[in-house]
Amino acid sequence: MSAALQTLAEGVSIKGNLGAIGYGLAAIGPGVGVGIIFGNGTQALARQPEAAGLIRANQILGFVFCEALALIGLVMGFVYPS
């Protein structure tokens, strides 16, 4: 590594809250989960419209569990600040 590049690398520091970056990355999981839940729920409703009540109840339950994970991640950023 050249001397100029090494000096530049030593002078660079990460500032800010890394917890915010971690939460942003952790929010991808529940986002994908909610998409899968409602996508598959829509397909299930198209295949068996007579089971709409049961399918919708299961969709809402799955949505609540996915969003609970996202909210727990948000709260952990405040409980354990970096």
Image: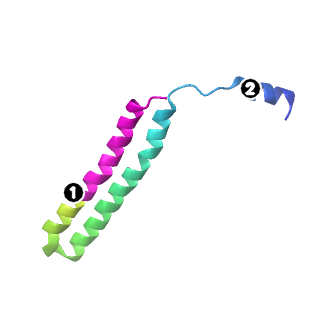
Q: Which mark is residue 16?
A: none
Would you call the spot at circle 1 few (<14 residues within 10 Å), some (14-19), or many (20 or more)?
some
The residue lying at 15 percent from left, 73 percent from top is: 51
Would you call the spot at circle 2 few (<14 residues within 10 Å), some (14-19), or many (20 or more)?
few
According to the picture, the residue beneath numbered tag 1 turns out to be 60
Q: Does the stretch in magenta take in 20?
A: no
SS assignment for the magenta stretch, majority = helix
Q: Image quadrant of residue 58?
A: bottom left
The residue lying at 84 percent from left, 35 percent from top is: 1
Q: Image quadrant of residue 55?
A: bottom left
Circle 2 SS class: helix
Q: Which residues are magenta?
A: 61-82
Amino acid type for the residue under numbered disc 2: Glu
- Viewer-proximal residue among 69 and 5: 69
The residue lying at 68 percent from left, 26 percent from top is: 12
Q: Does the stretch in magenta take in 79?
A: yes
How was this image coloured?
rainbow
Amino acid type for the residue under numbered disc 1: Ile
